[in-house]
Image: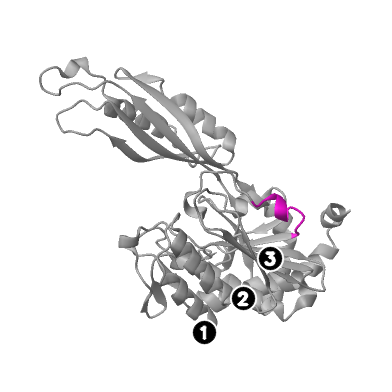
Amino acid sequence: MGEMEQALEALVAISSPSGDIEAAERTVSVCEGRLPPEAAVERLQCSSPGHAQDLLARLAGSGRARILLLGHLDTVFAHGDHVELQRDGQRWRGSGTVDMKGGVALALALMGWLAARPELFAELALLLVVDEEWRLAPFAHVTRFEAFDACLCFEAGEQSETGEERVIVRRKAAGTLEVTARGRAAHAGSNPDSGANALLALADAATAAAALHDPGGPAGLSVVPSRIASGGAINVVPADGTLMVDVRANSEAAFGEVIRAIPASSHGAALDVQLIRSWPGMDSRAACAELLGAASRRLGRPVLAGSRGGASDASHFAGSIELTIDGLGPRGGRAHAPEEYVNARSFPERLELAMALCEVMPGVLNRSPGAAAART
């Protein structure tokens, strides 16, 4: 636990919002200093332009499994909102503690444990990216790892309502819509009706999109207008503006329904809709059932399969790596909020879970015709 606590404290001490190159380099340096000495280190071009390079560390083993450990080093907090690690009993508060510097600390500990057990893997890779929280470009690293047997991602862990350990094997697809309004300025007092109000048009667009919000429906569609910007002077009809809409669904196909629901114009202003970010969903429930069952027997307690609405880089790998499991990080809460925290007691519990998965994985792969076929 001591090494994970030290790694967490060092990482959370660095304010690392997406896009800050100097901060990203500092977090990468912290991680490099905690890698097994025999690890081969590479820096990979980040998916997002203008960012620091991502970190890849690799170990060669004598076993069969090719395992990818996955995490990210960036956070959503601006520097002025950053909170360093604060301990209050078992609740440790700080920016990125649970999303996901705590998970990175745990992944580093797992890699160190595996380094002493090379019979459990043929190749072990740790990929830490610096742009997960606000990436609009396509994810750059999928093909590099498409022949791997397992992807273990260390986003926040969780328990069931009755206290059993739970991991994430199903996630919704996630998208971001940008709605642009082009209206016409006018004096708000002397001739307001000669203008075309972009702000009102965007409000109509937000209302039309949000009317489709139905997370309990067959498509699992959630639609959340999340940001609007329009207008300048207080006495001018706004001539332009933008609206951002967060959409989640069981399939990316549902995003088109939201786009079609937004009118082409409103209040005399033209509206243009662009899907500027689209992440796939993941569903590895069937593929991971045997692995989770074997890990449960190894631990002597159940490991349950769960789902989550939030997006994750694990979803990008799930299409080519059958055994993709997320939510392996420590438990906590209030991610993306000033009160974000991690449960200190959960670090050794979740590390034990990840160890069990790696210990039973060779046996599961030996019985998997799908894995054998993928290698031929």
Q: Contact (CB < 8 A) between labels 2 and 3?
A: no
Q: Which residues are magenta?
A: 141-149
Mark nearer the N terminus (2 vs 3): 2
User: Is 244 placed above or below 300 here?
Assistant: above
> Left or right of 361: which side holds 27?
left
- Residue of label 1: 2
Mark nearer the N terminus (1 vs 3): 1
- Residue of label 3: 125
Q: Contact (CB < 8 A) between labels 1 and 2?
A: no
Q: Residue at x 40, y 74 (%)?
A: 92
User: Is 172 placed above or below 290 here?
Assistant: above
Residue closer to the observer: 363 or 142: 142
Amino acid type at circle 3 is Ala
> What x and y, as percent, mark residue 181?
35, 26
Residue 35, numbered circle: 2
Considering the numbered disc 2 on the image, is that residue within a helix, a strand or a loop?
loop
